[in-house]
Amino acid sequence: MTVTVVGLDADDTLWHSESHFAVTETRFRELLEPWIRGDDVSARLLDRERSNLEIFGYGAKGFTLSMIETALEVTNGDLPASAIQRIVDWGKELSSHPVELLDGVAETIYSLSDEFQLLLITKGDLFHQESKVAESGLADYFDRVEILTEKSPEAYCRVLAGSGIDIREFVMVGNSIRSDVLPVIEIGGRAVHVPYDITWSHETVDTSLGEVTWTQIETFSELPRTLTRF
Amino acid sequence: MTVTVVGLDADDTLWHSESHFAVTETRFRELLEPWIRGDDVSARLLDRERSNLEIFGYGAKGFTLSMIETALEVTNGDLPASAIQRIVDWGKELSSHPVELLDGVAETIYSLSDEFQLLLITKGDLFHQESKVAESGLADYFDRVEILTEKSPEAYCRVLAGSGIDIREFVMVGNSIRSDVLPVIEIGGRAVHVPYDITWSHETVDTSLGEVTWTQIETFSELPRTLTRF
């Protein structure tokens, strides 16, 4: 069946996101240097983020609260109030950072929208994601924008069913094998992986995946040519 | 035109929410008592919430970050780290509080669902709202769940258009005049107001509203009878 609908991830597929989190984490490591080693800061933060995920979900606000908790914990409370305010300010910066499209994304979206139905399928904080879509200048090119709490196979099923889309005419494109590739393949769809420079540790997957096949491209601009081969 | 579709707000219409925030705010006032008067704490917190709204949106995580900022500000940083951790813990409690349905809600929803298409239309944090819908035990009775960042007239239009619903067959039911009643009337729809004991200051409206008409009922259980009169 020919592909007629393209699902597109947003963060780190269309625009930079993880790089902003990485910059913030570097500052956070520096802030806590007097107390513990940078790598230990990162490890403790990741633990905290993971345990907070089921309470706060994904996104900059939960990340900020996890930084605050980690900071209180590793310093045994020996942290000046000004440091807490700096962390909150980083959280605000993360939540309101200007949207920077990745190279070639705008032109590629324009050209794809002539030929395909485009669905933006992203996860995370509703408010922040909607702001970014609005600011990206690309909103008019998407037939639909779906913001999910988790990109599970069931969530993809729901999105496709809600728009009356046959999984066989659908391909998902994104930077995360865990969120954009595997769940779509699990429900019988196809996927294109466009790696981003940085992957959040939570999104990495075991590489021994057995018999699973997807297409990997190096840059988003290669997408139109790749889709002609599906 | 007969009403065939009922839109239902969630927080403080189907289940308690604002009362949990109020309990937290009382604790927060007590925490800061050594520094400033309770009423001033509430006023400063509301200011902070309002200015953070365009960065964080609605919800418990943004509220928690606003409490932290307010606490740092009014104490000039003279606040023990343990107090910050307490605030974060309150935020977690707020984010994971068990869902308590308001009186008569479950039975009323069961009976309405036989006769009407039910749309849950709420605003706030996607992750938290979805968790509450799932936990409420009512999810199967809703034809659709829409979680919005803001309940503007445009947002209601989008929701109705997305489901092919004529505004004349629609009635919105909720506890907020600002979010559930006025925007729906503005786009030509009807609304039923079910007041909740507490209204967040941000949701209050000027009472001199001019020529606007809606129906007010005292308890959610009156809804089926009210709808027969539409």
Image (cartoon, coloured by chain):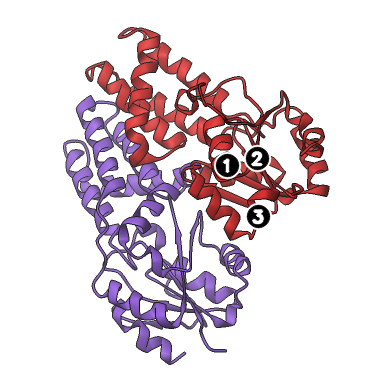
Chain colours: A red, B purple
Image side of residue A201 versus residue A34, left or right: right
Q: CA distance from mark 2 to mark 1?
A: 7 Å
Say what secondary structure mark 1 lies in: helix
Circle 3 residue:
A166
Q: Residues within 10 Å of mark 2 (few under 14, many from 20)?
A: many
Residues packed near mark 3 inside 10 Å, few (<14), some (14 to 19) or many (20 plus): some
For image coordinates 32% across by 49% down, the residue present is: B43
Chain ID, mark 3: A
Labels 1 and 3 touching (C-beta < 8 A): no
Q: Residue at x 46, y 45 (%)?
A: A149
Q: Residue at x 65, y 56 (%)?
A: A165
Give the image location of residue A151, x and y in percent.
Answer: 51, 42
Nearer-the-camera pick, B10 or B23: B10
User: Under tag 2, what secondary structure?
Assistant: strand
Tell me the kind of residue under disc 3.
Answer: Asp
Q: Specify whether A72 is left or right of A3.
A: left
Q: Nearer the viewer, residue B164 or B167?
A: B164
Tag 1: Cα neighbours inside 10 Å, few (<14), some, or many (≥20)? many
Tell me if label 2 and label 1 are in contact, CB under 8 Å: yes
Query: Which residue has dot 1 on it?
Result: A184
Secondary structure beneath dot 3 equals loop
Q: Which residue is mark 2?
A: A190
Above or below, A136 relative to A38: below
Q: Nearer the viewer, residue B219 or A11?
A: A11
